[in-house]
Image: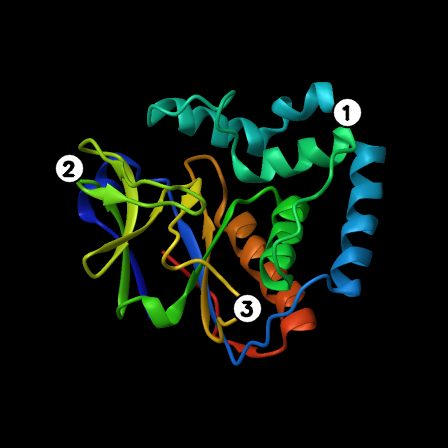
């Protein structure tokens, strides 16, 4: 599967990169003990190394916050995914357990500070593209009861005629990872100021955690 960035997005955000990887032959369950152990270990490390009042000062969280402001999203209302998960842990709030696949890449996101998008490959066409939206396009995100009508120049990921994400913070209902998913695409979501190496780590850690609890095998990681 190809993941590409449109020319106009690349022109406006030349330092924005994505890392992506395919995972196939998955068997997805729920409430993995391995995920629970990994989460506890990472949570303990975070509590020792980071204070909740200083979360927004982390350079990577600051880069995502700055990008959100740049694209017209208020990061105090819609927080970057990795930051939101870290804040939950530091507040002592319950970690959202969805299924073993989603839990595993959320753990990787906490570890690396990189938001991760995930999509059922059976729903996608041969190419996914990060591009600007067109006026009037519709997007139905996970958990939304009604589609959102988009303005022009919102960052989206499309595959074929369908929008599968508003970038970099909300995936679509139709392509979400479920217990029936067997093959998946992972995208490590970058913004200006986030190095390729950090995106690569996000994809690598997602792959490692997912294969431990869901089995399967992976393609090589690609960066665009």
**In which quadrant of the rendered view does residue 47 lie?**
top right
Residue tagged 3: 179
The picture places residue 67, in percent across and down from the top left corner, at: 41, 29
User: Going 50% across and 72% down the picture, which residue do you hit?
Assistant: 180
Q: Quadrant of the N terminus?
A: bottom left
Looking at marks 2 and 1 on the same chain, the residue that comes earlier in the sequence is marked by 1
User: Going 18% across and 57% down the picture, which residue do you hit?
Assistant: 161
Residue tagged 2: 136
Residue 51, disc: 1
Looking at marks 1 and 3 on the same chain, the residue that comes earlier in the sequence is marked by 1
Q: Quadrant of the C terminus?
A: bottom left
User: Going 73% across and 39% down the picture, which residue do you hit?
Assistant: 94
Q: Residues within 10 Å of mark 2 (few under 14, many from 20)?
A: few
Q: Residues within 10 Å of mark 1 (few under 14, many from 20)?
A: few
Badge 2 vs badge 3, beta-carbon distance below 8 Å: no
The picture places residue 18, in percent across and down from the top left corner, at: 41, 52
Helix, strand or loop at mark 1: loop
Q: How is the image coloured?
A: rainbow
Mark closer to the observer (1, 3): 3
**In which quadrant of the rendered view does residue 26 lie?**
bottom right
Q: How far is mark 2 from mark 1, CA to CA?
A: 42 Å
Q: Residues within 10 Å of mark 3 (few under 14, many from 20)?
A: some
The picture places residue 220, in percent across and down from the top left corner, at: 48, 72
Helix, strand or loop at mark 2: loop
The picture places residue 21, in percent across and down from the top left corner, at: 46, 66
Farthest residue, direction left: 135
Q: How far is mark 1 from mark 3, CA to CA?
A: 35 Å
Image height check: is 41 above or below 85? below
Helix, strand or loop at mark 3: loop
Badge 1 vs badge 3, beta-carbon distance below 8 Å: no
Mark closer to the observer (2, 1): 2
């Amino acid at each position: 599967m190809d993941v590409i960035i449109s020319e106009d997005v690349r022109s406006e955000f030349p330092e924005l990169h994505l890392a992506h990887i395919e995972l196939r032959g998955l068997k997805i369950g729920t409430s993995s003990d391995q995920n629970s152990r990994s989460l506890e270990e990472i949570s303990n490390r975070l509590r020792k190394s980071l204070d909740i009042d200083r979360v927004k000062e982390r350079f990577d969280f600051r880069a995502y916050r700055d990008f959100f402001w740049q694209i017209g999203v208020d990061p105090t209302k819609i927080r970057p995914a990795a930051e939101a998960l870290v804040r939950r842990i530091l507040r002592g709030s319950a970690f959202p357990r969805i299924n073993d696949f989603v839990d595993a890449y959320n753990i990787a996101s906490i570890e690396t500070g990189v938001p991760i998008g995930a999509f059922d490959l059976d729903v996608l066409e041969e190419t996914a593209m990060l591009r600007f939206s067109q006026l009037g396009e519709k997007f139905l995100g996970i958990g939304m009861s009604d589609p959102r009508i988009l303005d022009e120049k919102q960052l989206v990921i499309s595959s074929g005629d369908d929008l599968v994400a508003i970038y970099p913070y909300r995936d679509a209902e139709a392509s979400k990872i479920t217990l029936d998913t067997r093959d998946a695409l992972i995208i490590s979501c970058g913004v200006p100021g986030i190095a390729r190496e950090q995106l690569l780590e996000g994809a690598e850690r997602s792959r490692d955690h997912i294969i431990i609890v869901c089995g399967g095998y992976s393609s090589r990681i690609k960066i665009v």
